[in-house]
Image (cartoon, rainbow, N blue to C red):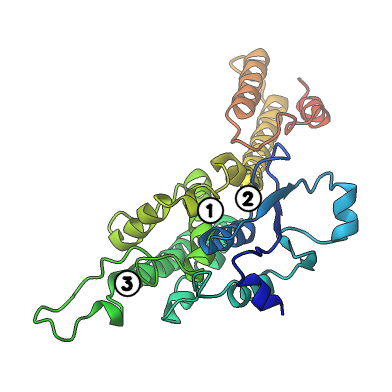
Amino acid sequence: MMASRLRSPLKEPEIELFVKAGLDGENIGNCPFCQSLFMVLWLKGVRFNVTTVDMTRKPEELKDLAPGTKPPFMVFNKELKTDFLKIEDFLEQTLAPPKYPRLTPQNQDSMAVGRNIFAKFSAYIKNPHKEANKNMEKALLREFKRLDDYLSTPLPEEIDQDCAEDVLVSKRKFLDGNWMTLADCNLLPKLHIIKIAAKKYCNFEIPLEMTAVWRYLHNAYARDEFSHTCPADEEIERTYATVARDELRAIFHSCWLLAFQLSLLERLSSASSFHHAGFKRHLSHLFWTLHHTRPKGVSSNFFREKEVSSFCLFCHI
């Protein structure tokens, strides 16, 4: 009954998608799963509403609607859907041809390629042991190489058996052809996050020689379904700011150790060349530099007053 009603030209489903809100509590926040469902609904061509949910102050009506549930979730014809994977399958089965486009890729490899990229990126950017960074970066690059190879290799439907010339390099726009599919809806939001966060905090960029990946990204950003559902760069940077905060805290602890060593020198040294006032000015300048060069997302209160006070007391300044 429901399927027949949905295919009726007079009856459109009532759909409301709830996604994570950004820093201002209103705009779209950083959530690849939220963006994925946003893209799916847009590509389906169905009418729907989008509500951003500020998780810091969840509205009372949402507590009643979906208690304990985090975005994304959806209300479809007054029925609550909370499981991301099930929502995707439900939309593909319910919003089906001939009225709505099919988004399942023809080639299952299109869904599998790039599946490990985000996990490799997460391990790389969250790694506290800098000596392991090179190996983790290599692992991430290997996943990008697999993606680049897949995008460069012609799909079976790109090869014309009756054509005398072989197609050696694919020119398709997306993973499974020239139209976006569920594969793109799942991968592109994650690639966007990697592109922003890895550059900001790891100085990592997708190599220019991976031309197929860059072609893919350029084609994706040209589509409203993707570019207009992306969170602002600042949203992504703030999400991963804790990585930079940990690095800055490590610098702070190194400075603490240096000050400890200098304090010992001050106690032991009787040489007149050691100027206490000069050291104090140097230390003051050091704190100022660390404070004003902190990465985005690190609070201005990072150097807590009691830490600085105890630091100065310890060093007798």
Foreground pick, 219 / 113: 219
Distance from disc 2 to disc 1, alpha carbons, whole Å, reads 8 Å
Q: Is residue 226 above or below residue 285?
A: below
Kindly identify which residue carries mark 3.
Answer: 149
Q: Quadrant of residue 80?
A: bottom right
> Which mark, residue 193?
1
Q: Secondary structure at mark 3?
A: helix
Distance from disc 2 to disc 3, alpha carbons, whole Å, reads 28 Å
Quadrant where the C terminus sits is top right
Nearest to the eye among marks 2 and 3: give it.
Answer: 2
Give the residue displayed 70% in from the left and 46% down from the top.
Answer: 21
Q: Secondary structure at mark 2?
A: loop
Quadrant where the N terminus sits is bottom right
Classed neighbour count for the residue bearing mark 2: other residues with Cα under 10 Å, few (<14), some (14–19), many (≥20): many
* Lower sequence index among marks 1 and 3: 3
Classed neighbour count for the residue bearing mark 1: other residues with Cα under 10 Å, few (<14), some (14–19), many (≥20): many
Q: Amino acid at mark 2?
A: Asn
Q: Amino acid at mark 1?
A: Ile
Classed neighbour count for the residue bearing mark 3: other residues with Cα under 10 Å, few (<14), some (14–19), many (≥20): some
* Lower sequence index among marks 2 and 3: 2
Give the residue displayed 69% in from the left and 25% down from the top.
Answer: 266
Kindly identify which residue carries mark 2.
Answer: 30
Task: Point out residue 223 in the picture as x, y percentages from the top left corner.
Answer: 43, 52
Q: Amino acid at mark 3?
A: Asp
Task: Point out residue 160 in the picture as x, y percentages from the top left corner.
Answer: 19, 81
Is 171 displayed left or right of 234 in the figure?
left
